[in-house]
Amino acid sequence: MWDKERELWDTFQDLDKNGDGRLDAVEMKAALSRSGVEITPAVVEDLVRHLAHGVWKLPKKDTLSQEDMYITFGEFRDFLIMLPRRATPLEIYKCKSPLRPGSGLADKQTIK
């Protein structure tokens, strides 16, 4: 776990071009562009807003100032750690196996 967090910290530091300890929409857009992902500034702002505040669109009366539009390392780390990943074939097999506990079939099997 510590190795993964260190890797994420190093990535965050690399993306934080101005060294202020937070990622803004400009830094996120540049990072995505370097990765080959081209998106509009509005979409990048929505992404930053979501990662930083947990909302995609804010009503006009509740718009955030540019000072509030940044991602901290904690928010960056938590988002990436919680990203879903693909299940391995073994995990799928275990989940779909008719002999898994609680399936009814496993309960009827006897161990000899």
Image: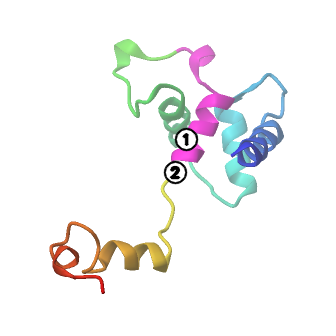
Q: Where in the figure is residue 93, as x and y percent of width and height?
A: 39, 80
Q: Badge 1, how many Cα within 10 Å: few under 14, some, many 20+?
A: few
The residue shown at (52%, 39%) is: 47
Residue labelled with disc 1: 79
Q: Badge 2, how many Cα within 10 Å: few under 14, some, many 20+?
A: few
Q: Is residue 98 above or below residue 61?
A: below
Q: Magenta stretch: residue 13 in it?
A: no
In the image as oriented, which residue stretches furthest toward the front? Answer: 112
Characterize the magenta stretch by its predominant secondary structure.
helix
Residue labelled with disc 2: 83
The residue shown at (77%, 48%) is: 3
Disc 1 residue type?
Phe
Q: Is residue 30 left or right of residue 71?
A: right
The residue shown at (74%, 42%) is: 2
Q: Which of 108/74 is in front? A: 108
In the image as oriented, which residue stretches furthest toward the bottom? Answer: 112
Q: Which of 52/30 is in front? A: 52
The residue shown at (23%, 82%) is: 110
Q: Secondary structure at mark 1?
A: helix
CA gap, disc 2 to disc 1? 6 Å
Disc 2 residue type?
Leu
Q: Is residue 16 left or right of residue 71?
A: right
Q: Where in the figure is residue 64, as x and y percent of width and height?
A: 49, 16
Q: Secondary structure at mark 2?
A: loop
Q: Where in the figure is residue 40, as x and y percent of width and height?
A: 56, 46
Q: Is residue 79 left or right of residue 104?
A: right
Quadrant, the C terminus: bottom left
Q: Which of 25/70 is in front? A: 70
Q: Is residue 26 left or right of residue 50?
A: right
Magenta residues (range) = 65-83
Quadrant of the rendered image containing residue 97? bottom left
Q: Is residue 22 above or below residue 46?
A: above
